[in-house]
Amino acid sequence: MLNTTEFRKLAHRVVDWIADYLENVEHYPVKSPAKPREIFKSLPDEMPANGEDFTNIWNDFHQIILTGITHWQSPNFFAYFPANSSYESVLAEMLTAALGVQCMIWETSPAAAELEEKMMNWLKKACGLPETWSGVIQDTASSATLCALLSAREKLSHFQINEKGFEGFTNLRVYASIQTHSSIEKDVKIAGIGKENLVQVPCDEEFTIRTDLLEKFIEADLQEGKKPLCIVATLGTTSSTAFDDLEKLAQIAEKYGVWLHVDAAYAGTAFLLPEYRHYLKGIEKADSYVFNPHKWMFVNFDCSAYFVKEKQWLIRTFEISPEYLKTANDSLVNNYRDWGVPLGRRFRALKLWFVMRSWGLRGLQKRLREHIQLAQELARKISAHPDFEIMAPTNLNLICFRYKPASITDKTLLNTLNEQLLHTLNNTGKVYLSQTKLNEEYTLRMVVAQTYVLQKHVWRAWELIQEIAKNLQLRYLE
Ligand SMILES: *Cc1c(COP(=O)(O)O)cnc(C)c1O
């Protein structure tokens, strides 16, 4: 066990290591080369009976753990969506760990509750969300969407499902596009609505929801006595950052009196930029909205911002008031235990505060615009190359593309070729991209959004992509 003196000494060493790590992170193989079970097997089967020297632990962190780490903070990380960090965010997380507070209710740390309320207001204003909404930090967008479905469910049933279960309330229907995130299906299952009651509406050629079909599906459900509960709009789909027509969805939600939830998990950060707010048209008619500062806003995982139009539906769905949690101030303050699933809560507002103050709105906007511009430039290059093809509109900074040399036309072969291209690229350790399928066609996804990414990283990646694709094609032609 460490004492204060040892802690002080080691903490300085650890911080030095963190600074060196972040400075050199681009030289690590981006995707961990670890084989399945390799790390597990190199760890002892039992905890040590006697405390070990910290030097041993520190050595094992380097020798065992780091080899099994995928370096999300590398500027060569272009996969999935990012989970960005920043120096400010890391400092705040160190302090959060040191304070070690549990923020279930106002009284268990008033500053945490009040800073959270203020930070949600800052975000709401900075992103152009309606002034009268209320916000709360959730761990992830998956949890926030679950809160939305449960609130919608309780509003529709006048809290009868919470009271008595589902009797009289079967066949609740939830609508989202076929491009919706997998968490929607997971949440529909957890909320007791049943996977078969998630209606996945086909998309148009730009991968946005067909609102004409949505309306037909709702009409058909009403005819059959089913109960339309909620429409989930996606602003920035995971596959290709497609934006559903929110204004039209808001009209449909209003017409049929159903809850409108907006999933902007990744792209929501773009609304810090006024030039992208046209996608938010109709937002004032939505009931709930989520985006993840832990993806693209330089606030490290986890931190998901959930906003609701009327907080009463959220709070009445989740509130509990056992004697041991009652306090004298309950009517004056926010007790966030009633704003989501867990009772215990981390102090997440601190990192938002550090990042928003140190970067400022202009600093954030500048970085986001740089990311978008880099991606747009690369998209133009890819599109101009005769052997490559852009697979979906590059609305922000995610480029969906594939290799398609004129010599290869077979659909299956193209899929195999692109799958091999991705694996070969990632196995170099020099870049990390991920994939999706669009219209059954294997598509590479390259997201230019990492905190530390610069033009040189993007160009180097593009050189490598062309080189490896060319070599693969030669092999195919042999
Ligand atoms: C990433 C993502 C999610 C899930 O986010 P978590 O916070 O990991 O639950 C949901 N929806 C969309 C559109 C996403 O991009």
Image (cartoon, grey):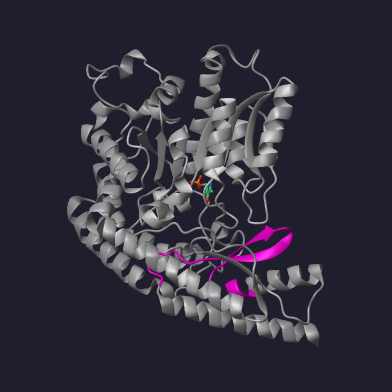
Q: Is residue 291 left or right of residue 22?
A: right
Residue 372 quadrant = bottom left
The range drawn in magenta is 424-453
Magenta residue check for 107: no
* Above or below 418: residue 172: above
Q: Name which residue lies at 22% across and 19% down.
A: 329
Q: Is residue 164 visible?
A: yes
Residue 6 lies left or right of residue 402; in this view the side is: left
Q: Residue at x 64, y 71 (%)?
A: 422
Residue 220 image-quadrant placement: top right
Task: Identify the residue at image location x=44%, y=23%.
Answer: 313
Q: Is residue 73 above or below residue 112?
A: below
Q: Is residue 88 left or right of residue 407?
A: left
- As drawn, the residue found furthest toward the left would be 5
Asked if residue 452 is among those painted magenta in the image, a careful observer would answer yes
Give residue 263's position: percent from left, percent from top.
51, 43
- Provide residue 87's location: percent of width, then percent of height: 29, 61
Tell which of 347 and 445 is nearer to you: 445
Pinpoint residue 191: horizontal percent, then vertical percent: 58, 28
Q: Could you tell me how many numbered marks the image carries? A: 0
Q: Residue at x 71, y 34 (%)?
A: 216
Q: Is residue 347 visible?
A: no
- The answer to which quarter of the image holds residue 219 is top right
Q: Is residue 264 above or below residue 425?
A: above
> Which quadrant holds the C terminus?
bottom right
The spot of residue 266 in percent (x, y) is 48, 52
Is residue 428 or residue 198 the one in the foreground? Answer: 198
Which one is in front, 344 or 174? 174
Residue nearest the observer in this picture, 127 or 275 = 275
